[in-house]
Image (spheres, rainbow, N blue to C red):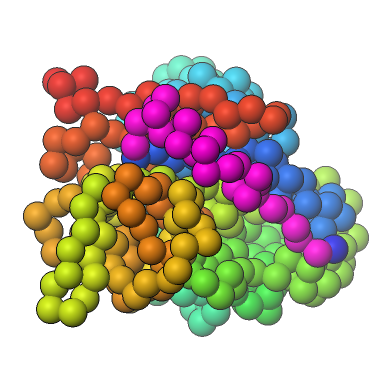
Amino acid sequence: MELKTECRWDQITPAEFHNLAERYGTPFFLYDADAINQRISLIRESFEGLVKVFYAVKANPNLELLRAVRGVADGLDISSRGELDQASLAGFSMANLSFAGPAKTTAEIAASIEKGVGCISVESMRELVKCTEIAQRLGIRANVVIRINPQSLNRFFGMKMGGKPIQFGIDEEEIDDALAMIVANHENLNFQGIHIYAGSQCFEATGIAESVKNAFGIVQRIEAGTSLTCRTINLGGGFGVSHGENGHEMDISALATILVPILKTFRNSSTVKREIIFELGRFLVANAGIYVVQVVSSKQSRSKAFFMVDGGLHHHLAAAGMFGTALRSNYILKNLSQPDAPSIHCNVAGPSCNPTDLLGVDIELPRPEHGDLLAVMKSGSYGFTASPLLFLGRNTPAELIQYNGRIFLGRRSMSMADFN
């Protein structure tokens, strides 16, 4: 199945974009929730219903966006009490949450147990001890999975989060003590299974397949060596998506061709009814968002053209090349006001006194005029909440949602004084 999830930016006219700018101010983010839901459904269908798709809230936690995906996503991956509360406000069942993170506080663990979070990914013996103690005190069994740091390093992931010394999970060679503790404390710990997140930004189907086969092998070793059953297997995610012009991303059709037989073989090897999960963030929402800024000034500096805009790294750190990448690469920029203007080779700079505040370096762009709106494409993930919003003291951008044929406000713009 070809994965087609087209966002509808081309259906919004320049006049309509300017109307949005006048109503909500610039800069603003705009997210296409319908495209996100379509992508979730197509991924699930591609794997023939053999896996569930959880949305990783960290990628974009906007409340109205979560509400829009609630009826389509199978659950949420969360990593803090704040995200737990956001999931609750969005109407998600606590049973459909998976809580991961290497530094869960005692209060976060207690809240997760008390509220009935479906899976607490235990990442250390300390967390396992805390789960046991708190569950005993509350008289509620804690739903736990063991997050495992695999021994093998998967070379296909751009950012490797397993197979080396790292803060995430319990090292595979050290899990016996954790498993023994779970068996000994079964009255307090409701063991669900395992969680393995090998890395992020994987563009090769064989890399994901290798990680999945490794996880299934670990499940089989646990079940052969203990009395425990892994009914939940969280395979992580890490499906790659590029923000550049090439549009490169994980080929879901190719991945399904390789992975579906593996999933079926594993399912048929046991009578245990299992829940197999992919948790995806960037892959679901990156393409479904744009960051819209307005040109306020321009200049020539030693033969190079610069266009200064009212947004930058304080709202979108990743687009300035300062979040989650080893090497800077330009996001795609478009001139929303004059898409057919003659092209110019230029740089697009934000308003700060930091020379790295650049949204575009040596790019080709339809020549903007003062007042034109520019869009930073593929800005649906790790934008608003992954940026230093109070830096410069400028207003935060409004976040708009496109859902069911209309555009509405998902989060209002706020001034620095609103945070005092």
Task: Looking at the picture, tell me which residue is in the foreground, 408 or 135.
Answer: 408
Residue at 49% across, 78% down: 153
Q: Is residue 419 visible?
A: no
Residue at 55% across, 65% down: 241
In this view, 357 is above or below 217: above
In this view, 259 is above or below 337: below
Residue at 39% across, 38% down: 28
Task: Looking at the picture, tell me which residue is in the foreground, 401 or 368.
Answer: 368
- Residue 3: x and y, percent? 76, 60
Locate residue 151 relative to residue 81 in the image: left or right: right
Task: Looking at the picture, tell me which residue is in the foreground, 96 or 163.
Answer: 96
Locate residue 225 relative to residue 273 in the image: left or right: left
- Residue 284: x and y, percent? 60, 51
Q: Is residue 293 visible?
A: yes
Task: Kindly indicate the quadrant of the structure image that contains residue 72.
Answer: top right
Q: Is residue 13 magenta?
A: yes
- Residue 81: x and y, percent? 39, 30
In this view, 90 is above or below 32: above
Assign the C terminus to one quadrant of the image.
top left
Task: Looking at the picture, tell me which residue is in the foreground, 30 or 365.
Answer: 365
Residue at 59% across, 72% down: 248
Locate residue 417 relative to residue 61 in the image: left or right: left
Q: How many marks?
A: 0
Assign the N terminus to one quadrant of the image.
bottom right
Seen as rendered, the residue at the extreme left is: 353
> Range of the magenta residues?
2-26
Q: Is residue 114 magenta?
A: no
- Residue 275: x and y, percent? 74, 46
